[in-house]
């Protein structure tokens, strides 16, 4: 054996030796304790984690059905209310008047129909004519009384301003009146002084208007003007009362004088309020008298016309139309009372007396008195893993992760809701027991046990790898060799462990994180 042959053999031996040592090191490095796990029998839990908000079982936000001025508010935030309770009211005087008018028309038309159905006698004609005469006389009396009331309204206003209130001013009837005492609220002072200048012009024109009235001679415009003027005087006196009621005596203003001012202003205000009430009553009397006259005339006309089938049918149709009108107006009246359809607690109250409320303005919110729920939009990737009745554990951000609350899946909407173009499904959770700590609007973190397999073979999911579409693990034999084993995984747990359905037995050892 020559030198080169010996040298080649020596090199081969060294290579084999190195390869042998390398093989031992590889097996040893793969058989360390940290990379070996046993197949054990255990429990695999699949969980779904979600975040939502607590909310009442029922919640309603209420608004008036019709536009109108709010006249009364009965509740505040935090009040407990019951179903059907009136929470706020709009001014309903106009609705009541319209209903009364419609009912009067209905009664008139019912009477007309009754006359048509009975037929007409000469005695009935005489009675009908007498009714007309009496109604016309009553109307004339009401109109004369109304004219007297219009004149009296001016007299009361003139006396209230020029006798009761003008003592508070210097040059009250000029273009530059001023208070005889100091007023600290400059904005209110300016408003009152400008109002007094305007009132002087208004009183002069008003006097000319009422001077032209006599007997039953008046116009609708005159009536409207007087009503507007009374409201103007009332508002002016209200402002004057604000100033007088805060006066205090000093070296130039005695308490006796202040008391006199207050009494005179109070007398003026009472007089104007009386005038307003008298005008409203006189106006209503005229309208009622006019309706009574029209009713009497209609009865007379029907009595004279005789009865034909077509007229009876028309009268019946008119009565039905009147009934529908009354029903509509009564609904309008009812809509001016804001009622809650549920019992619960008031969580929002923005209605204010005197403000105009419209149907587009939500004013009051009610949360039901029942238990709170949690509402969550579950992504489509998770919704298939939960069903109604699933148990859930809940933590609330307000109390931290150590405080657990029990809940169940109450419902899952069948239809999707798109959020950022991702289909989600609204899911509702119910707490299994009441707890005073839970408040509406709290952030809730929910964990649902969607599946749980007990007494099954379990290994870490990291031990499983895939080749050619199949799942495998490396099994460590007792002699230290490793062989590839085909396995069938089952449920994957939240902790990373995986259920093994086929391919392994309890106690076998598998390797983790070795080259596949």
Image (cartoon, rainbow, N blue to C red):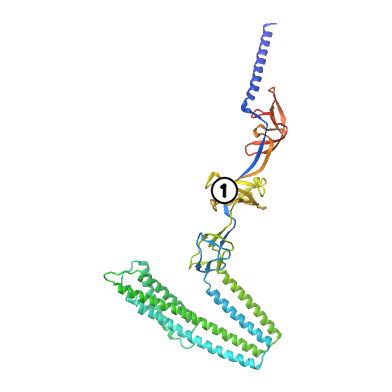
Residue at image location 66% in from the left, 82% down from the top: 315
In the rendered image, the residue lying farthest to the top is: 1
Where residue 38 sits: x, y (%)? 66, 30
Q: Nearer the viewer, residue 398 or 120?
A: 398
Q: How many marks?
A: 1
Q: Is residue 132 above or below residue 105?
A: below
Question: Percent x, y for residue 403?
Answer: 55, 45
Q: Name the side, left or right, on which 437 lies relative to 469.
A: left
Q: Residue at x 63, y 23 (%)?
A: 29
Query: Is the residue marked by circle 1 packed among few (<14), some (14-19), or many (20+) residues within 10 Å?
Result: many
Instruction: Kindly state the secondary structure of the residue where label 1 is placed.
Output: strand
Q: In which quadrant of the rendered image does the C terminus lie?
A: top right
Is residue 177 visible in the rendered image? The answer is no
Is residue 417 depicted above or below 112 in this figure? above
Measuring from the top left, give residue 187's x and y in whole percent.
Answer: 37, 67
Q: Pinpoint residue 425: horizontal percent, then vertical percent.
A: 64, 50
Q: Which of the 4 image quadrants contains residue 163? A: bottom left
User: Is residue 394 something that shows in the picture?
Assistant: yes
Give the vertical position of 445 relative to 229 (above or below). above
Please name the residue that numbered disc 1 is placed on: 444
State left or right for residue 272 relative to residue 316: left
Picture quarter with the N terminus: top right
Foreground residue among 296 and 210: 296
Q: Is residue 431 above or below residue 174?
A: above
């Amino acid at each position: 054996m020559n030198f080169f042959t010996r040298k080649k053999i020596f090199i081969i031996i060294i290579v084999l030796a190195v390869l042998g040592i390398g093989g031992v090191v590889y097996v040893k490095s793969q058989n360390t304790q940290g990379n070996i796990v046993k197949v054990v029998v255990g429990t695999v839990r699949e969980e779904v984690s979600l975040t939502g908000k607590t909310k009442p079982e029922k919640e309603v936000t209420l608004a008036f059905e019709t536009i109108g001025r709010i006249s009364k508010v009965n509740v505040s935030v935090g009040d407990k209310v019951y179903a059907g309770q009136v929470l706020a009211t709009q001014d309903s005087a106009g609705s009541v008047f319209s209903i009364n008018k419609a009912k009067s028309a209905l009664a008139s038309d019912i009477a007309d129909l009754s006359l048509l159905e009975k037929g007409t006698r000469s005695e009935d004609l005489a009675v009908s004519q007498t009714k007309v005469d009496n109604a016309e006389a009553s109307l004339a009396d009401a109109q004369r009384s109304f004219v007297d009331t219009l004149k009296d309204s001016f007299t009361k206003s003139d006396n209230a301003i020029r006798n009761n209130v003008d003592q508070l001013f210097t040059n009250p009837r000029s273009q530059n009146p001023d208070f005889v005492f100091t007023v600290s609220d400059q904005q209110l002072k300016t408003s009152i002084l400008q109002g007094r200048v305007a009132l002087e012009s208004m009183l002069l024109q008003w006097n000319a208007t009422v001077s032209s009235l006599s007997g039953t001679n008046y116009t609708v415009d005159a009536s409207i003007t007087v009503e507007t003027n009374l409201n103007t005087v009332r508002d002016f006196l209200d402002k004057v009362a604000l100033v007088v009621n805060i006066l205090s005596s000093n070296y130039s203003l005695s308490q006796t004088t202040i008391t006199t001012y207050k009494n005179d202003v109070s007398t003026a205000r009472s007089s104007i309020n009386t005038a307003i009430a008298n005008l409203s009553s006189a106006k209503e009397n005229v309208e009622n008298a006019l309706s009574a006259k029209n009713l009497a005339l209609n009865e007379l006309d029907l009595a004279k016309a005789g009865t034909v089938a077509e007229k009876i049918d028309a009268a019946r149709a008119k009565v039905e139309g009147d009934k529908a009108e009354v029903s509509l107006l009564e609904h309008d009246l009812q809509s001016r009372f804001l009622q809650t359809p549920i019992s619960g607690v008031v969580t929002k109250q923005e209605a204010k007396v005197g403000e105009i409320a419209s149907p587009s303005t939500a004013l009051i919110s009610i949360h039901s008195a029942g238990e709170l729920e949690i509402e969550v939009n579950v992504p489509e990737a998770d919704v298939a893993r939960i069903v109604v009745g699933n148990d859930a554990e809940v933590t609330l951000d307000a109390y931290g992760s150590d405080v657990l609350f029990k809940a169940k899946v109450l419902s899952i909407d069948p239809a999707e809701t798109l959020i950022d173009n991702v289909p989600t499904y609204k899911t509702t959770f119910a707490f299994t027991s009441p707890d005073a700590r839970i408040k509406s609007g709290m952030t809730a973190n929910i964990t649902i046990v969607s599946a749980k397999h007990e007494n099954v073979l379990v290994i870490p999911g990291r031990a499983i790898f895939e080749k050619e579409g199949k799942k495998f693990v490396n099994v460590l034999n007792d002699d230290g060799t490793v062989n590839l084993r085909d396995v069938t995984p089952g449920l994957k747990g939240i902790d990373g462990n995986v259920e093994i359905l086929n391919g392994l037995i309890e106690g076998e050892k598998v390797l983790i994180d070795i080259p596949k």
